[in-house]
């Protein structure tokens, strides 16, 4: 069976500091991978998706970037965090028709 | 107009009630419809998945799609306190390599014991 991991689970960072969130998937190969942000009381905002190694598509212009260095690894980064980057970050994978989510990382920028 | 509309709630019901959760959408090309359940501070988990129109039942849960009205529903029978969560609807087009989903904003459900 497939599993998806995210770490860290929670993170508190000062404004202007860098960010690296990691997502890995087990039990499948060549999945589509996605990064979402969920702000308090709001829906899921798709940030990036990837259909293969090194292939990243950005959905919204922002302070974040994504990379896929390996088939089942997806990384979300920032060089300098803003207060508005706070939120719940979710990674998801897809092979056929739907998506499966990881446990999420709660990021607080102070 | 948003592509997918979902009443945010909160919806509060007594234990044992039948719950009806709904979403409307504007793009008639959507073919795949999903419901996710999200507990507080957790990632969404896939609850129900249907293709095109019709009903699908899984235990106490029934998903219904009415493409002519662009309306989908999730029914929960004999609701339990453990059903208290946010329910997100999602949908996608029939084709495309990205499998991108369009989500509703979620309905917060509280089942009172």
Image: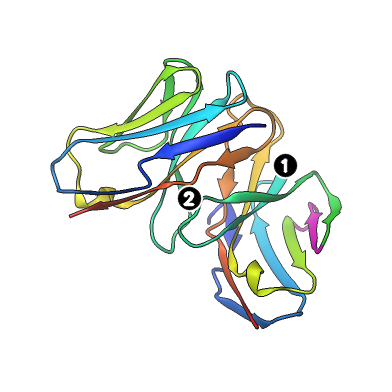
Question: Label 1 lies in what chain?
Answer: B
What is the x, y in percent for residue A11?
28, 48
Residues in magenta, as a range: B60-69
Asked if A94 appears above or below B6 in the picture, the reply is above
Label 2: few (<14), some or many (≥20) within 10 Å? many
Chain ID of residue with mark 2? A
Residue drawn at the location 69% of the way across and 48% of the way down:
B34
Q: Where, by quadrant of the figure, is residue A101 drawn? A: top right
- Does B67 appear in magenta? yes
Quarter in which the C terminus of chain B is drawn: bottom right
Front residue (pair A81, A61): A81
Q: Is residue A12 left or right of residue A54?
A: left
Residue A40 in percent (x, y) is at 39, 61
Query: What secondary structure prevails in the magenta region?
Result: strand
* Same chain for the residues under marks 2 and 1 in the image: no
Instruction: Name the side, left or right, on which A1 lies relative to A102.
Output: right
Find residue B54 and name its label. none
Residue A34, percent across and down?
49, 34
Q: What is the quadrant of residue B95 in the picture?
A: top right
Tell me the SS state at disc 1.
strand
Count neighbours of disc 1 (C-alpha within 10 A) and say few if under 14, some if 14 to 19, many if 20 or more: many
Q: Which residue is mark 1?
A: B32
Callout 2 secondary element: strand
Q: Which residue is mark 2?
A: A44
Q: Is residue A65 above or below residue B39?
A: above
Q: Position of residue A44 (x, y in %)?
A: 48, 50
Residue at 61 percent of width and 80 percent of height: B12
Q: Residue at x 58, y 35 (%)?
A: A3
What residue is shown at x 72% (from left), y 33% (from top)? Answer: B94
């Amino acid at each position: 069976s497939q599993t998806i991991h995210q770490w860290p689970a929670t993170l508190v960072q000062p404004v202007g500091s860098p960010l690296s969130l990691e997502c890995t998937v087990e039990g499948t190969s060549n999945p589509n991978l996605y990064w979402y942000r969920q702000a308090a009381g709001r829906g899921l905002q798709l940030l990036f998706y990837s259909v293969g190694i090194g292939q990243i598509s950005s959905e919204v212009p922002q302070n974040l970037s994504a990379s896929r260095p390996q088939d089942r690894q997806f990384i979300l980064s920032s060089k300098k965090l803003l207060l508005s980057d706070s939120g719940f970050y979710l990674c998801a994978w897809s092979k056929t028709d739907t998506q499966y989510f990881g446990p999420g990382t709660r990021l607080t920028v102070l | 107009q948003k592509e997918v509309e979902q009443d945010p709630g909160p919806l509060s019901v007594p234990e044992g009630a039948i719950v009806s959760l709904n979403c409307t959408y504007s793009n008639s090309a959507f073919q795949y419809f999903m419901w996710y359940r999200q507990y507080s501070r957790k990632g969404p988990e896939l609850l129900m998945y249907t293709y095109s129109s019709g009903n699908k039942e899984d235990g106490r849960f029934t998903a219904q799609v009415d493409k002519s009205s662009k309306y989908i529903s999730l029914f929960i029978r004999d609701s339990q306190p453990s059903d208290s969560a946010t329910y997100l609807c999602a949908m996608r087009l029939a084709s495309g390599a990205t499998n991108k989903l369009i989500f509703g904003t979620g309905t917060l459900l509280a089942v009172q014991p």
